[in-house]
Amino acid sequence: MRVAVVDIGTNSTRLLIAEVDRATGGVEPVLRRSEVTRLGDGVDSGGTLSDEAVARVLRTLAAYRAEIDSHGCEANLAVLTSAVRDAANGGAFATRVRDEFGLDARILSGDEEAQLTFLGAMAGRPESDDPTVVIDIGGGSTEFVIGRGRMAGFHVSLPAGVVRMSERHIHSDPPAPEELQNLAMDVRAIFSEGLPPQERAAVALGIAVAGTATSAAAMDQELDPYDPERVHGYPLALGTVELLLARLAGMTEAERRNVTGLHPDRAPTIVAGMILLSEAMRAFDLEEIEVSEHDILYGGALRLAGVG
């Protein structure tokens, strides 16, 4: 079954067109697209989606709709996450997405987002009884899902993402040391409050999905151009994340735009992303995580096909 899934996130808008094998649960990508649209600009402070941010997303959706039509998709789903959940005008924006682009737009709760993310991250993996945490660092929030095999258990969406934390704490270029310290302290407190100690202690394996983790893997390998085959499954050590953070935090935004392996549009938020990733690993006492290209887009594709 050929399906299309659009993820309208706080920082980026992404498209996956894929063939899903209902018998095996296999997902074979046909087309992937990603644009940094920063829908969440200003939502943390102002409470609404700005006209400029909405316009960026709508332009991207027009291009995605053309791709969906040309690839003969049988079903589609658009998932709207943290920025739209939090914005006073989020519901009106979702209606526009449905009416103007014919997309089945759904504002996901934090729990729904976590469940789809776990479903996607486990796609194609061998069965294992090891308690696994899937870490999804977004623009407005970070999702943690703990489960075994294909079954998600504890899951939580916490209000700490790369756009939200950057807007809240980083006001210098390059960031001042005290800004980095305050950002890390804020993230640590949010994670500590939202992640019960007994859940953290049980985890044996960590999988990180989405742009912060995939960018870290690409930067560590100095990939140019980006190669999803070399990113998927890449082991990323905590020490490597800390080295990347120190390197990136010492640069201006203009300098970060030229870092090999980092998409230039992620330069404004990648420092916050590296802090979020390192604090997430510390929260679960993980010295290494596995980076995955399989995330909420894969979960949405499987759900559309009636798998999982």
Image (spheres, rainbow, N blue to C red):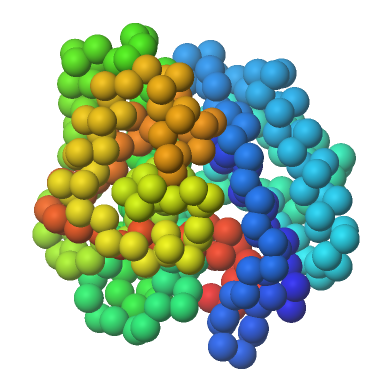
Measuring 35% from the left and 84% from the top, which residue is drawn there? Answer: 127
Measuring 24% from the left and 12% from the top, which residue is drawn there? Answer: 176
Q: Is residue 169 visible?
A: no
Q: Position of residue 69 (x, y in %)?
A: 87, 58
Left or right, residue 184 beside residue 74? left
Measuring 58% from the left and 59% from the top, which residue is drawn there? Answer: 297
Left or right, residue 61 beside residue 277? right
Left or right, residue 217 beside residue 74? left
State the quadrant of the N terminus. bottom right
Question: Residue 59 falls in which quadrant of the image?
Answer: top right
* Nearer to me, 266 or 164: 266
Examine the rendered structure and indicate whether residue 182 appears above or below residue 201.
above
Examine the rendered structure and indicate whether residue 181 appears above or below residue 265.
above
Question: For the image shown, how many numbered marks are present on the structure?
Answer: 0
Measuring 65% from the left and 18% from the top, which residue is drawn there? Answer: 50
* Nearer to me, 79 or 59: 59
* Nearer to me, 251 or 116: 251
Q: Is residue 91 visible?
A: yes
Q: Position of residue 142 (x, y in %)?
A: 38, 43
Question: Residue 158 falls in which quadrant of the image?
Answer: top left
Q: Residue furthest bottom?
A: 23
Q: Position of residue 295 (x, y in %)?
A: 49, 59
Left or right, residue 262 beside residue 9? left
Examine the rendered structure and indicate whether residue 124 appears above or below residue 171.
below
* Nearer to me, 304 or 162: 162
Examine the rendered structure and indicate whether residue 164 appears above or below residue 71.
above
Q: Position of residue 221 (x, y in %)?
A: 35, 52
